[in-house]
Amino acid sequence: MIAAELAKQAHRARGWVTLAAMAAIPAAIVLVIAATRPGLAERVGDYGSVVTDTSGLTLPLISLNAMLLFMLPLAVAVFAGECVAGEAAWGSLRYLLARPVSRVRVLGAKAAVAALYSLAAVLTVVAVALLCGALAFGLHPLTVLDLQHTTPFFVASTRLSPLSAIGRLALAAAFVAATLSSTFAFALLLSTITARPFSAVAGGLGLGLVSRALDNVPGLHALSPWLPVTDQASNLWTGFFADPMQTVGVAHALLVQALYGAVLAAAAVWWFARSDVLA
Amino acid sequence: MIAAELAMQWRRPRTLATLAALCCFSFALTLALALSGGDRLQRVGDIPLLIVPERSGGSIPVIALASTMKFFLPLAVAIFAGESIAGEAASGHLRYVLARPLSRERYLLAKLVVALLLSLIAVLLVPLAALAAGAAAFGWHPLTAIDGSASTALHTAVLGFSPGATLARMGVGTAYVAGGMLSIFSFAFLLSTLTAYPFAAVAGGVGLTLVSRVLNSDYLPGVAVLNRWMPNNDVDLWEHFFQRPAQTAGMSHFLLLQLIYAGICLTAAWWWFTRRDVLT
């Protein structure tokens, strides 16, 4: 079932176009940096900073930081929001459901394939940035400045060997992918509710927008650890590049994502199993 | 024509719900601050201004406007602008309206004026509701704010504003934010003439604020040249009115930019709508 769905999605242009965009943007970032501003410090996350031409390993960090706000959530929302609503928009959903397969299994297979594509989007960003960065600036050890602990008298920095940096990069990619799961689950839920893929995708992005807007209201700070998408939680991966690794709050962020993911996905299953499919 | 349109929009649940939601935001904010954190320093904006809300009700409009200007107000404005024409198309009324002996320009103009008016009400409502709630909760004392950018470890730049001065600065600030919504409004209005799905027009309007936020050198290296030309980036400059002396750098540029965006989008909307083949 999952294999059949995967084969079907692999024939569609949408997935490839989205992944190509996820590859093109880091490549463009590397190009812009190499062409116009090598050797400048770029901020990464809340307190990290890297100097671009010291190592190609800086580019995956810069790319992740740049794409975390909008492009990656967009890619994830496209995959999750299209998966059922896209079928409904084509008019093929009711024929699909007429086959002797339970609706829960259909949704499960579609969600699994969409999740696979979403994961691929995150990995594409990191891999392409790493590749282009290595070509442009070489695979030298990675130096990360810790702006939190840097004073006028003392520069706090971490130097990581290429191998260790790539290992931490893999961890960071996994964490970033996990922080996107609330967006994914919300877009999936909308996808089962609406027959217009655009609405599901825009709504999935809207979750992050509302959440960030609430996060920025002074006086509502008590709320922010429990919001699905916040800058603090999304930026926790930069702590992986400190020495020793800073993992404060990572478990909490993952728990919040798991909660939102589980509740929204359960709602999607509940809704889809009962909905009157007309398209 | 305008009066009829206004009367119709005013009765719609959508209009009232949007305005009520904005009011509720101000009330909920006041309540949240009164229940927790009213006696603590709150950081407002990028300067940052450091304000203890409890000291004066005048602090609530500042906080409310600062926390709605980047998403909730653009959303409300995009709803009013995006629904205006597309809403008629979605309910299937548009072709009957256009069948009446009335030029499309006049119809578009009436829609535009009413949507503008509702958007203006939305922007005014947030600080007004916050002012009322703040004054009721914390009293009407002079506003004290610490200018975070002018303060160092050795010197704290404390600024005091009399109630009259707070009101005046809030008034000009609100007018500035209202002006800053023009680009989003016009873009959503343009989309509203293009599509028959109101949701797409609203999402497009909100999408413009997103583009503005994403193409920001804080996140994406190499796009610093674009920053000054983004439609929603500098909407927070009004906070500088609460520095001393009040800073106005960049404001006229931003307002001019809004006029340029509005001019382009509204002309395109007019051009398209007067020629469009209306099917719904």
Image (cartoon, coloured by chain):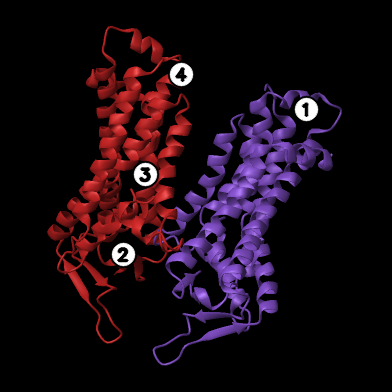
Do the residues indicated by labels 2 and 4 lie within the same chain of the protein? yes
Do the residues indicated by labels 1 and 4 lie within the same chain of the protein? no
Task: Locate residue B159, reporting x and y percent.
Answer: 19, 71
N-terminal of the pair, mark 2 or mark 4, is 2
Whether pointer 2 and pointer 1 mark residues with C-beta atoms closer than 8 Å, the reply is no
When asked about the image quadrant of residue A4, the answer is: top right
Chain under numbered label 4: B
Determine the residue positioned at 70% across, 77% down: A163
N-terminal of the pair, mark 4 or mark 3, is 3
Nearest to viewer (mark 2 / mark 4): 4
Chain under numbered label 2: B
Of B68 and A188, the residue lying toward us: A188
Give the letter of the purple chain. A
Q: In the rendered structure, which amino acid carries the disc numbered 2? A: Pro
Nearest to viewer (mark 2 / mark 1): 1
Q: Is residue B188 above or below residue B93?
A: below
Residue named by callout 3: B74
Cα gap from disc 2 to disc 3, whole angstroms: 25 Å
Residue named by callout 2: B53
Residue named by callout 4: B91
Chain under numbered label 3: B
Cα gap from disc 2 to disc 1, whole angstroms: 57 Å
Estimate how packed mark 1 is, as few (under 14), some (14 to 19) or many (20 or more) residues with alpha carbons within 10 Å.
some
Q: In the rendered structure, which amino acid carries the disc numbered 4? A: Ser
Cα gap from disc 4 to disc 3, whole angstroms: 24 Å
Q: Secondary structure at mark 2?
A: helix
Do the residues indicated by labels 3 and 1 lie within the same chain of the protein? no
Determine the residue positioned at 66% across, 55% down: A259
